[in-house]
């Protein structure tokens, strides 16, 4: 039976008791019992973790400040009535979000944020005054009222944010969060020592993650294998990971980014010089500091919820339009399959999608095959059961058109890693590092690997590398570019075959 993680009894002091507590929290970890079938499991859905550093308290503080300021300035029946408090609060939240004032901070300070808060308050109320002057010139806000609104907004916002930060610091002192320091032992141990000596950060280092290390030693244990790091994250409820060099410095560190992201950890880069170049992640601003170390939040490029919702909306809209536009072509394809190969126009097959969730993929049938063979046979190239109609549908990719309905249903996206059968997902995940990580993103009809010719019987390792690169550098513009390349390749096939 797995041992339970040791509880931290102190507040992160540097004495022997604090060191012993840290060592027990990691050295008490035992390998979990896993069946042979579990060794190649699909990627799990990232955990939703309730953190102390959420944005809701800061949003509430900013909204309250905006409401109180509007109430003090506005007059019933005037061009700026008290009812304007709600839209002003929303606009203030948008301005603060644009400035990065809701991003996680290790050492938040309302006074350090004062210039940004003052600039946004001035912009907000100058804009409000301009709207009032344009709408009702006779009731425009005077200079004294405008200056009072800006000053009051600044004072109330700073006071509210200061109170939220104070509550968080007290909570962090009582219940520090577990953190792993990732990087070479020499630099990582210095960061861990700084965290041990400063309990006000509310972070308790439980180990150093260095896959190049020989042995664990020193005040904080060294975790040298990927499995030890994974167990430490799970059993110690690790909520933060701080890197002492860019994550893409080596392939082992890059794989740890995916592990931490899958378990809901916040990622940080501690760079003493503040000059590290990060390519696979977005370095969020403003910068922070950890006992003199420049620290910046690291955000995976694929972890943008707002843009993900936009992607889903675009997928649904474009797929619905494409279904209507392609209906005549699909009707011709269905009729050709029915005449050539008999009943059963649509072929259904289980595939693995987002976070390892199975779904039923739809295609036009191109050959007769039993269910077991379809699920376990890798390629059907040269199969004598494939009719000329089936061969044409495969070469032209017209057999993929029914997958537009999978996109409308939400099983797939227009652009993403191609879905694979469960049998091959388990097989490839056991052989090719990084194959599981493809399931961080919704699977798609086309993708970066496909437009680079990686279709059919091609390298799985190359496909996984292209798919993970697409996920790590994902953007809406890249999706549109891939769709344009896909359409262009389809028309090149039509022209070349005519």
Image (spheres, rainbow, N blue to C red):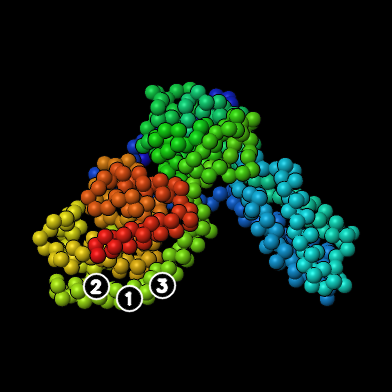
Vertical side of 20 occupied by 431: above or below: below
Check contact, mark 2 vs mark 3: CB within 8 A: no
Residue 397 visible (yes or no): no
Give coordinates of residue 432: x percent, y percent. 29, 42
Locate residue 416: give its quadrant. Answer: bottom left
Give coordinates of residue 422: x percent, y percent. 26, 54
Label 1 or label 2, whichever comes before in sequence order: 1
SS assignment at label 3: helix
Q: Which residue is mark 1?
A: 327
- The dot on residue 173 is none
Residue 327 or residue 119, whichever sits in front: 327
Pick the quarter of the image with the N terminus. top left
Distance, label 2 to label 3, CA atoms, is: 18 Å
Residue 233 or residue 269, whichever sits in front: 269
Q: Is residue 175 left or right of residue 387?
A: right
Residue visible at 34% across and 37% down? 31
């Amino acid at each position: 039976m797995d041992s339970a993680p040791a509880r931290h009894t102190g507040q992160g002091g540097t004495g022997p008791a604090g060191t012993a507590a840290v060592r027990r929290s990691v050295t008490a970890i035992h390998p979990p019992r896993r069946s042979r079938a579990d060794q190649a499991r699909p990627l799990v859905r990232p955990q939703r973790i309730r953190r102390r550093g959420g944005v809701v308290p800061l949003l509430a503080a900013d909204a309250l400040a905006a409401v109180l300021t509007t109430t003090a300035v506005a007059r019933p029946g005037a061009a700026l009535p008290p009812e304007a408090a709600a839209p002003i609060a929303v606009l203030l939240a948008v301005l603060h979000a644009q400035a990065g004032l809701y991003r996680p901070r290790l050492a938040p300070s309302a006074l350090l944020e004062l210039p940004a808060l003052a600039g946004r308050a001035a912009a907000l109320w100058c804009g409000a005054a301009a709207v009032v002057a344009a709408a009702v010139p006779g009731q425009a806000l005077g200079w004294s009222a405008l200056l009072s609104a800006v000053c009051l907004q600044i004072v109330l916002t700073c006071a509210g944010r200061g109170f939220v930060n104070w509550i968080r610091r007290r909570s962090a002192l009582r219940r520090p969060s577990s953190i792993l320091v990732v990087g070479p032992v020499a630099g990582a141990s210095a960061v861990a020592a700084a965290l041990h000596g400063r309990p006000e950060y509310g972070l308790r280092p439980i180990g150093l993650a260095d896959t190049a290390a020989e042995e664990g030693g020193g005040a904080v244990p060294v975790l040298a294998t990927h499995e030890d790091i994974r167990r430490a994250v799970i059993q110690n409820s690790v909520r933060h990971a701080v890197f002492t060099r860019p994550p893409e410095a080596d392939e082992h560190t890059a794989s740890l980014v995916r592990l931490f992201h899958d378990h809901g950890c916040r990622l940080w880069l501690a760079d003493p010089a503040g000059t590290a170049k990060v390519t696979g992640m977005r370095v969020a601003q403003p910068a922070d500091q950890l006992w003199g170390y420049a620290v910046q939040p690291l955000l995976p490029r694929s972890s943008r919820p707002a843009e993900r919702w936009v992607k889903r909306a675009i997928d649904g809209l474009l797929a619905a339009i494409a279904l209507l536009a392609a209906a005549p072509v699909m009707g011709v394809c269905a009729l050709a399959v029915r005449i050539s190969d008999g009943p059963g126009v649509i072929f259904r097959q289980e595939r693995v999608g987002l976070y390892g969730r199975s779904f039923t993929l739809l295609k036009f049938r191109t050959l007769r095959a039993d269910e077991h063979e379809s699920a376990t046979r890798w390629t059907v190239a040269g199969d004598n059961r494939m009719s000329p109609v089936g061969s044409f549908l495969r070469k032209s990719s017209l057999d993929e058109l029914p997958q537009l309905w999978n996109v409308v249903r939400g099983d797939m996206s227009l652009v993403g890693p191609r879905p694979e059968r469960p049998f091959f997902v388990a097989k490839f995940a056991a052989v090719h590092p990084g194959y599981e990580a493809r399931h961080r993103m919704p699977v798609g009809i086309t993708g970066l690997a496909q437009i680079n010719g990686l279709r059919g019987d091609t390298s799985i390792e190359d496909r996984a590398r292209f798919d993970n690169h697409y996920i790590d550098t994902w953007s809406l513009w890249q999706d549109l570019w891939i769709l344009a390349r896909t359409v262009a390749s389809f028309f090149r096939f039509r022209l070349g075959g005519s």
